[in-house]
Image (spheres, rainbow, N blue to C red):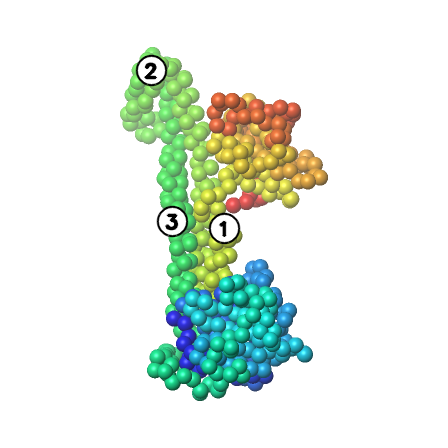
Amino acid sequence: MSLNWKEIDLVLSELHLEGAQIQKIIQSDYNALCFSVYGRDGAQNLLVVIAPGVCRLHTTRRTAPKSEKPLRFSELLKSRICNARIEEAVQLGSDRIIRFRLRRNDERLRLYVRLWSNAANVILTGDEGIVIDAMRRLPKRGEVSGGHYVPEAGQSVPASAAPIQSRPSSASCEFLIRELPGGGSFNEKIDDWYAERGGAFSLEALRAQAVKLFEGGIGRLGAALEHLKEKEKKYFEADRLKEYGEIILATIQNSSGGSEWLETADFFNDGSMIRIKLDPQKRPQDNAAHYFEQYRKAKHGLSRVQREIIECEAKLDHQQAVLNELLLEKNPLKLQKLLKTSRSTKPFRSAGKQRPGIFFKRGEWFLTVGRDAAENDELLRKHVKGNDLWLHTRDFPGSYVFVKARAGKTIPLNILLDAGNLALFYSKGRAYGKGDLFLTHVKYLRRARNGPKGLVIPSQEKNLAIELDEERLRDLETCRIY
C-alpha cells in the first residue's frame, strides 16, 4: 500500500532536507527516481516511487542502478535542478502532495511529488506554476510542458503551507502510522518493508517474475538434453552395425541369397548364435554394405549429438546461473533492472522464437549455415539480403552457407575458404573430403517452381573447388556463436 499523509509527514520530519544540496539524480525506471542529497545529516539517497499501490518517498540504503538508456525526465532534472539547494520540503495539507522549493543560482523552481495511488506524478514548475515538464505527461490535467500546476490554490491552507501539526481534524481519525517491524528510523523501516513486501516492486514479486521468465527455457533445455542423451545412447551401439556387416561378409560363401535372416556364429561374442536381418532382394555383399552405411551414419551422428549435448549443457548451466544470480539479488531496484535487461536482450537462443541456422563470426564477417531444407528456405525468405553470398555443393545435397555482405568490402579469400569448408562439411560430400561448390549472390537465386522446400536455381554462378581442411574447421568451431 502507499504512504498515507501522516506517514509522509513523519518521513519528512526525519529527513531535515532544508538547506540540503541535490548532487545526483538517477531515474532507474519509469516509476522510480533517486536523489542523492547532502545536508546537515550528511549524504542521503532519497527514493521517490510513483508506481500504483506503492507510492512513497523515503531514504534508502540501496543503490539505485542507472537506466540502460537516458530517460527524458531525469535528463531534464539533471540540467535544471542538479546542484540546487532545497529551501523547503513540505506536504501540502493532508493531500499527499510534497512541494520542494529549489534554488540554483538566481533561478527558483518547484518540484511537486504527488503520491496518489492511481494518479501519482512528479512535476517540475517555475516559481509561478508554469509546468516545465512532468514525469508522467497528463494533458487532461495540464501536467505537460507549458501547463499550469499550482496545487496550493485548491488547499484550505495558504500557499506557504501550514505547519505540519496543523491538519484537518477529521483526517486524524482516518489514518494511522503503521507499526512496522525492524529497528531504526521510520524511513529505514519503510525502506526495508517495501523492499520485501512492496507489491510489484518487492523482492518477492520480482523473484517470482524471474522464476517465471526463466523456468520455461530451463524446462525446454532439460527436455532437449534428455532427448539428445537418448540418441547418444542409441548411437553408442553403432559398432554393432559394423560387426553385422563383417559377419555377413565372413559367411558370404555359405549364403545363397534370398533369405530374410542370417543365422550364424557370432565370432565377436564368444561364438554364440546370432540372427541378422537381411533384405532378400539384395545380394549378401549389398546387405553388408547397407550395415556399413548405417554404421557410418551412426558414427557421424554420434559426434554431432555429442557436440549438441555440450552446447545444450552449457546453455542450461548459463540460464541456471543467471537465474540464481537474480534470486540472490537483495536490491529490488537492481533486480528490476536485471529482469528488464534479461527480457530485452534475449540472451538465450533457446527461449522463444529464434533465428534459424548455425552462426560463425570470423573477425568482422558473419557466416550462417542452414541445417536442413526448412532452415535453408527460412533463411532465404526472411534473413538474408541480395548482396549476401550463397554457397552450396554442386553434386551433393547439403546446407546453404551465407556470408553477410559488408558495404564497400570484398570478401577476403580466407573467409571464402571458411564458407566453402562449411558448405562441404555440412553436406553429403563430407565423406569424400573434397568437392565443387556453387557460388553466387542471393539476388541471383530463383526458387524452383513447384519444387521441394528450399530448392533454388542459381544464375551467374561461379565454381569453387574445395578440399576439407580439418585445422580450419577446428578453428571455425572456436568462432561459433551460440
Cα–Cα span, label 3 and label 1: 16 Å
Q: Secondary structure at mark 3?
A: helix
Residue at position x 51%, y 22% from top? Answer: 449
Q: Nearer the viewer, residue 114 or 138?
A: 138
On screen, 120 above or below 322?
below
Q: Residue at x 46, y 85 (%)?
A: 164
Identify whether 441 is placed above or below 310: above
Q: Secondary structure at mark 1?
A: loop
- Residue 382 at x, y percent in the picture: 53, 37
Give the total number of marks visible in the rendering. Answer: 3
Q: Earlier in the sequence, mark 3 or mark 2?
A: 3
Q: Is residue 224 above or below residue 285?
A: below
- Residue 346, label in figure: 1
Which residue is pictured at 47% across the width and 25% down the height? Answer: 452
**Label 2: element kind:** loop
Q: Residues under labels 3 and 2: Cα distance?
A: 46 Å
The residue carrying mark 3 is: 219
Task: Locate residue 362 relative to residue 98 in the image: left or right.
Answer: right
Q: Which one is closest to the eye, mark 3 or mark 1?
A: 1
Mark 1 to mark 2 CA distance (whole Å): 54 Å
Task: First in sequence, mark 3 or 1: give its number.
Answer: 3
Is residue 139 found left or right of 201 in the rendered image? right
What is the quadrant of residue 55 in the picture? bottom left
Instruction: Confirm whether residue 431 shows in the render.
Output: no
Name the amino acid, label 2. Pro
Q: Amino acid at mark 1?
A: Lys
According to the picture, the residue beneath numbered tag 2 turns out to be: 280
